[in-house]
Structures are given as structure tokens and as C-alpha cells.
């Protein structure tokens, strides 16, 4: 397919707008800043993905590729992405986020290492018990793996499975609490085995992306604690590790489905399969375009209703048996009527579904302010507060989930992780509040 000249120009403009702030203010701590991770994710979603589907329309979601005006829809999506990135930078460089960071007190450095270890153990055991209950409700590990090998997601089989699956994610939180202990308090040989065990547990729940995110957050904890890890070679090694993990997961599934011959065949076609897997993982551009196309036609404007869904998604169905419909489920019913689950419209798509263009651009503006707040708060507390880097890591990756997924679900994940970390901290802290000014990690 011949790429429309205006589409290529928009892709170049997005790249220029994404890279320019880093060229103008280059520091050694760039890889630890929220803007680095947000803009990196944004570039993958709104540059690499649309470029690939312009080159090969077969990679696009069939809902938009089947539209007669397909190239125009892609160009329109790129124009919206460019405007959204501009709004993000405007929000980021306003002083509102920095001023907000000074209103939040810093938490103390003084904690009991023994109590922190108790918190790690308690968090892991609670998650492990929830995982066992979840396995029983799904019919056992064999049945659960059979579902995963069929490339089906694990949904709530009954009123027990869903809440227990969420609670079982505490094993991942425990692993990061242990890794934070290892890099910030004192060396701990058990931290790495705990991380590997937690990764295996989360992987069996269908969370390959969650496993990769767990290891990326581990890298960020190291980079925040030890400047020598703020290097592109370590980040490149991490990306290579994630690719190898995806390769191993793909080969294991093929071997289970068709034996060793299928596994070998998957390795032979690895470059093509890896490209397809990556593109399948980041379809948010297509789904954002589909949201813009469908809203006002098949989908009525929600006018903020999808954000209110945060309240019911926080409560287990066993306690509140209410039927909810997130923005992702609404979109899936239109673009994949016979599918299951949801199709995340991305932050801009959900904003458009609620308030049109104002909602799509407004949410990126607010994300810019939020990321500046995270950066300023980290700069103040990185050296004077033990818990700030851990809270920053959890919140940053929940923000990335918000950018790419469904708002209420990302907020729920953030509250879940941050709440567990704060409980662990207050259990082990010698209680006092202070607000000293720490040495800046990067100019806030």
C-alpha cells in the first residue's frame, strides 16, 4: 500500500515532537523519568503501529481496514495522536504538577528491616492462598493451562474466580517489595528466587504482559537506586530479555499443541511471528480510530459514565453483583460482536467516547500534569524517603496502563499496588512524617 504523504508527514511530526524535549534537556537520569516511559509507549502505539498498518493493511484491525475510507481514518488517527502529544507536553511543562507535588508530605526513611521482611512474606502468602483458591475454582492447574494454550483469556468462571485472581496478584507486589528491600535496605539472596516464582505464578494466570512488566519495574527500581544502571545497554538487555521470554512462551504453546515439530516450525518463522505478536499486543491505535469512527453512531457518547465505572470495578462481584460495562466492552461489542472480554480504546479513545475531541485531548493534558507531579515528587523524595521510589514505580506503570488501556481498570491496579506498598511500609516504619528536600534526581 502506498503510504499517503500526509500520513508520513504526521508520523514524522509525532517523532519530532516526541524526541525534541529530550534533546533540549538531556540528563543521565532520563531513563527514570515518567516522560521517557510515557513517550516511549506513545511512540510504539502511535508511530510504529500505524506505520506498519499503512505498509500492510492486513495487520490492521478488520473493523477499520474494511472501511472504504481506511487511509483517511489512519491519517485522522495520526492527526489526533499528534494533537494529543502536544497537549501532553503542554500539561507537563505547566507548573501545576510541580506545585501539586509540594502539597504531599514525604514519608520517612526510618524503617525496621525485620518488619519489612515480614510484610513481604505476608503479602506473598496472602497472594499464594488466593492463587490456590483461584486454581480450584478454575478446575485445577491442568484445566487452567489448557485454557491458556488455546489462547483464551482467563475470565471470571464464577463469583470466586475473579476476586481471587486479582488478590493473587499480590505475589507480584511481594516480589517487588522484596526487590526494593534488596536494592535499598540490604542485600537479600531470596529476592531473585521470589521474583522468578512470582513470575511463574502470574504467567499461569495468562499474564505474560504482566510478567514482562514485573521485570521492567525491577529494572526501574535498580536504575533509581544505582545510577550505573541508567544506561542504554541495560535497557537494551531488558528488551532482549522480554523478546526471548515471548519467544519461549510462543514455542511452549506450539509444542503443547502440536509437539516438537510445531515448536521447531515456530522458531523457523520466528521473525514473522514476533512481528505479528508485537502488533497484536499494541492494537490501541486501531481501537482508538475505531472508537472515533463508532462514537456518535453505533456508540452513544457516555458523557463521563465510563469513568464512574471505577466504583463498581473496585468491589468483588460476590459482594456487589452488579453488571458493569467498561469502555473496552462497549467497543468490543461494536468491532467484534462475537468476541469476549474488552478491547481497550486507549486513554484518548476513552476520552473521545465520553466527551468527543475535548475529552480525547483533555485527558492527555491531564496526563502531562500528572507525570510532572510524579517527576517532581520523585525528585524531592528519592534520597530522603525510602518508599517514594517504590510508589513512583508502581504509579508510573499504572499510568502507562491508563494511557494504553481502560481508565477504571488502570486506576484499580494503581490503587491495589500502592495500597499494598503503603500497608507494608506503615507496618515497618517508625512513625513520623517529614517533608525534607532531597537531592534532585532530575530537575523537576
Image: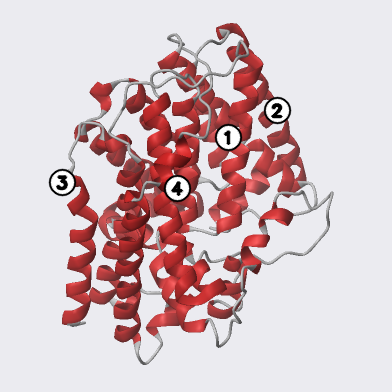
Q: Position of residue 47 (x, y in %)?
A: 27, 64
State which quadrant residue 430 falls in: top right
Front residue of 224/281: it is 224
Q: Secondary structure at mark 2?
A: helix
Indicate which disc, 1 or 3, sits on the residue closer to the N terminus: 3
In this rendering, which labeled residue sits more in front, label 2 or label 4?
Answer: 4
- The tag on residue 418 is 1
In this rendering, which labeled residue sits more in front, label 2 or label 1?
Answer: 1
Indicate which disc, 2 or 4, sits on the residue closer to the N terminus: 2
Front residue of 261/329: it is 329
Residues tagged 2 and 3 counted as in contact (Cβ below 8 A): no
Q: Is residue 116 above or below residue 45?
A: above
> Which residue sits furthest bottom?
68
- The tag on residue 126 is 2
In this rendering, which labeled residue sits more in front, label 1 or label 3?
Answer: 3
Q: Which residue is mark 3?
A: 24
Callout 1 environment at 10 Å: few (<14), some (14 to 19), or many (20+)? many
Residue 255 in view here: no
Measure the alpha-carbon separation of dots 2 and 3.
47 Å
Residues tagged 2 and 4 counted as in contact (Cβ below 8 A): no
- The tag on residue 258 is none
- The tag on residue 370 is 4
- Residue found at x 56% / y 42%: 414
Callout 4 environment at 10 Å: few (<14), some (14 to 19), or many (20+)? many
Measure the alpha-carbon separation of dots 2 and 1.
16 Å
Callout 3 environment at 10 Å: few (<14), some (14 to 19), or many (20+)? few
- Residue found at x 30% / y 73%: 78
Indicate which disc, 2 or 1, sits on the residue closer to the N terminus: 2
Amino acid at each position: 500500500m502506498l503510504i499517503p504523504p500526509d500520513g508520513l508527514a504526521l508520523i514524522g511530526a509525532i517523532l519530532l515532537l516526541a524526541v525534541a524535549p529530550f534533546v533540549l534537556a538531556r540528563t543521565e537520569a532520563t531513563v527514570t523519568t515518567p516522560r521517557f516511559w510515557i513517550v516511549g509507549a506513545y511512540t510504539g502505539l502511535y508511530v510504529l503501529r500505524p506505520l506498519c498498518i499503512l505498509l500492510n493493511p492486513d495487520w490492521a484491525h478488520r473493523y477499520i481496514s474494511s472501511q472504504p475510507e481506511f487511509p483517511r481514518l489512519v491519517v485522522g488517527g495520526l492527526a489526533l495522536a499528534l494533537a494529543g502529544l502536544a497537549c501532553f507536553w503542554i500539561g507537563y511543562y505547566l507548573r501545576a504538577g510541580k506545585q501539586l507535588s509540594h502539597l504531599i508530605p514525604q514519608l520517612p526513611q526510618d524503617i525496621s528491616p525485620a518488619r519489612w521482611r515480614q510484610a513481604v512474606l505476608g503479602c506473598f502468602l496472602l497472594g499464594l492462598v488466593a492463587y490456590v483458591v483461584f486454581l480450584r475454582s478454575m478446575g485445577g492447574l491442568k484445566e487452567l493451562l489448557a485454557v491458556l494454550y488455546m489462547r483464551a483469556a482467563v475470565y471470571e468462571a464464577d463469583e470466586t474466580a475473579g476476586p481471587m485472581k486479582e488478590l493473587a496478584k499480590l505475589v507480584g507486589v511481594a516480589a517487588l517489595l522484596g526487590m526494593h528491600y534488596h536494592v535499598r535496605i540490604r542485600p537479600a539472596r531470596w529476592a531473585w528466587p521470589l521474583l522468578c516464582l512470582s513470575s511463574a505464578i502470574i504467567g499461569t494466570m495468562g499474564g505474560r504482559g504482566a510478567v514482562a512488566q514485573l521485570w521492567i519495574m525491577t529494572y526501574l527500581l535498580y536504575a533509581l537506586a544505582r545510577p550505573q544502571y541508567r544506561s542504554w545497554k541495560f535497557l537494551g538487555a531488558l528488551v532482549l530479555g522480554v523478546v526471548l521470554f515471548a519467544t519461549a512462551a510462543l514455542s511452549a504453546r506450539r509444542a503443547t499443541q502440536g509437539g516438537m515439530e510445531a515448536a521447531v516450525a515456530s522458531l523457523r518463522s520466528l521473525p514473522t511471528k514476533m512481528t505479528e505478536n508485537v502488533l497484536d499486543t499494541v492494537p490501541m491505535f486501531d481501537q482508538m480510530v475505531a472508537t472515533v469512527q463508532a462514537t456518535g453512531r453505533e456508540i452513544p457518547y457516555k458523557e463521563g459514565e465510563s469513568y464512574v465505572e471505577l466504583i463498581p470495578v473496585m468491589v468483588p462481584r460476590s459482594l456487589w453483583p452488579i453488571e458493569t460495562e467498561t469502555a473496552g466492552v462497549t467497543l468490543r461489542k461494536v468491532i467484534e460482536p462475537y468476541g469476549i472480554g474488552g478491547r481497550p480504546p486507549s486513554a484518548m479513545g476513552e476520552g473521545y467516547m465520553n466527551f468527543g475531541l475535548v475529552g480525547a485531548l483533555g485527558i492527555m493534558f491531564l496526563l502531562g500534569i500528572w507525570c510532572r507531579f510524579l517527576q517532581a515528587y520523585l525528585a524531592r523524595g528519592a534520597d530522603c524517603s525510602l518508599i517514594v521510589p517504590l510508589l513512583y514505580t508502581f504509579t508510573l506503570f499504572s499510568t502507562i496502563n491508563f494511557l494504553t488501556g481502560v481508565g477504571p481498570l488502570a486506576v484499580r491496579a494503581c490503587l491495589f499496588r500502592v495500597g499494598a506498598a503503603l500497608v507494608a511500609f506503615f507496618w515497618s516504619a517508625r512513625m513520623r512524617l517529614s517533608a525534607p528536600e532531597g537531592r534532585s534526581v532530575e530537575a523537576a
